[in-house]
Image (cartoon, helix red, strand yellow):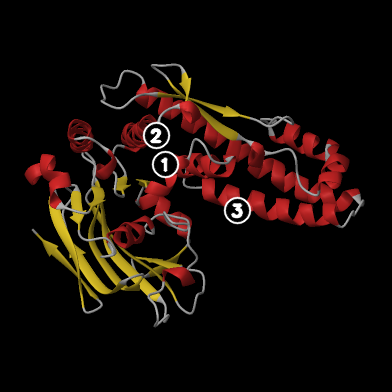
């Protein structure tokens, strides 16, 4: 069976870690320690071995250790189906992070072709009851795991939309200025929509027939009043026809940025937003596991899975079920918690790492 794992991780001046290093194998990792020891920062570091701004969506400057603020560097070894990649990502003086793969400068999107990383963090717990922006980001992260070019399409669409919005606010009426931007928006926007639809199809297939202790979610991509034309030509036409309406609003009212992810607790037929806090959490875990199963079916190997403080919100039976599913998947899951007791059900199926703070320097101790 194909596998994917980050087997070596080195942090330098990253968040609370002045210097820290881990060498591990492909088994799950149970990372525990006191609050503020830097457990979540380790998971954030791992998330940066994939494209984007990481699981906290922080700026490069915000990731630098304070008060030094001299920049940061992460390096690691990614083992992918018998191949080893040396990866380094860093930032100096708050500049955008750079990426090197096997000592060659690379685009961030190249990371998505060698390491698929999915995560669930406490800030996602309110996903179903907050604004649509968070749900789109959640879906787009899953889309990126299947389609590494999804981030490029999103950047292209947002850049063209920002330029078009500036024209709208300035009440520019020259159609030639709009036509070129709308052509770019239509091409990238239709690609974004197609990737999202394909991602939901993969998630549905991964949930159907799966024996799991976590509830299935019926998912649907819903649109604003203006709808989302699915072809490039139809979206370009819709943007052209919407110019005067958009000018009054000062922004584009048609496109993939107006979509939303609607979820229903399948067994009960209850919208996710109306479920209990525990049910909402269980639905999120179910989707992360479905994402991992779908990736395993799609590319042959499960992704690296990051679960921050997930065990604290589950009873012992559901914790054990989660650990069993992760191990059955063969995924390298990086999990955090305040104490080793939260990972007792894993036993020697996992590597147990304690994070300690010693005079400002992190110590990662295998136990």
- Residue 88: name its quadrant: bottom left
Looking at the picture, tell me which residue is in the foreground, 256 or 79.
256
Which residue bears the numbered disc 2?
277
Which callout, 1 or 3, points to the residue nearer the camera?
A: 1
Q: Residues within 10 Å of mark 3 (few under 14, many from 20)?
A: few
Residue 94 point in image, percent of width and height: 50, 75
Q: Are marks 1 and 2 in contact (CB under 8 Å)?
A: yes
Which of the two discs, 2 and 3, sits closer to the camera?
Answer: 2
What quarter of the picture does the C terminus occupy? Answer: bottom left
| Pointers 2 and 3 in contact (C-beta within 8 Å) | no
Q: Residue at x 18, y 51 (%)?
A: 30
Calculate the distance from the C-alpha at mark 2 to the C-alpha at mark 3.
33 Å
Q: Which residue is mark 1?
A: 125
Q: Name which of mark 1 and mark 2 comes first in the sequence.
A: 1
Given this view, does label 1 or label 2 mark the residue nearer the observer? Answer: 2
Secondary structure type for disc 3: helix
Residue 299: give x, y in percent of width and height: 34, 38
Closer to the chain start, of discs 1 and 3, is 1
């Amino acid at each position: 069976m194909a596998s994917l794992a980050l087997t070596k991780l080195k942090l330098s001046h990253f968040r609370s870690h002045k210097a820290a290093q881990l060498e591990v194998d492909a088994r799950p990792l149970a990372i525990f320690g006191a609050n503020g020891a830097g457990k979540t920062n380790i998971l954030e570091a791992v998330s940066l071995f994939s494209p984007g701004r990481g699981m906290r969506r922080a700026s490069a400057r915000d990731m630098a250790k304070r008060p030094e603020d001299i920049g940061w560097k992460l390096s690691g070894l990614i083992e992918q189906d018998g191949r080893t990649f040396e990866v380094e990502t860093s930032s100096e003086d708050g500049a955008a992070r750079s990426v090197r793969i096997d000592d060659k400068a690379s685009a961030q999107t190249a990371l998505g072709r060698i390491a698929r990383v999915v995560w669930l963090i406490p800030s996602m717990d309110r996903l179903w009851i907050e604004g649509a922006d968070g749900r789109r980001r959640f879906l787009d992260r899953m889309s990126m795991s299947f389609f590494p070019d999804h981030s490029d399409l999103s950047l292209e669409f947002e850049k063209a939309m920002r330029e078009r919005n500036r024209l709208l606010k300035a009440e520019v009426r020259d159609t030639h200025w709009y036509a070129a931007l709308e052509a770019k928006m239509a091409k990238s926007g239709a690609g974004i929509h197609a990737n999202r639809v394909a991602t939901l199809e993969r998630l549905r297939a991964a949930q159907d027939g799966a024996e799991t202790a976590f509830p299935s979610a019926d998912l649907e991509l819903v649109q604003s009043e203006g709808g989302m034309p699915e072809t490039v030509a139809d979206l370009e036409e819709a943007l052209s026809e919407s110019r005067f309406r958009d000018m009054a609003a000062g922004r584009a009212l048609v496109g993939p940025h107006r979509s939303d992810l609607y979820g229903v607790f399948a067994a009960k037929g209850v919208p996710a937003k109306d479920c209990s806090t525990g049910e909402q959490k269980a639905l999120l875990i179910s989707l992360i596991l479905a994402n991992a199963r779908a990736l395993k079916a799609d590319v042959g190997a499960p992704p690296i899975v990051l679960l921050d403080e997930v065990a604290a919100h589950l009873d012992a039976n559901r914790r054990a079920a989660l650990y069993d599913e992760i191990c059955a998947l063969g995924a390298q899951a990086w999990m955090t918690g305040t104490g080793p007791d939260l990972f007792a059900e894993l036993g020697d199926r996992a590597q147990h790492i304690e994070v300690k703070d010693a005079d400002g320097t992190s110590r990662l101790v295998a136990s």
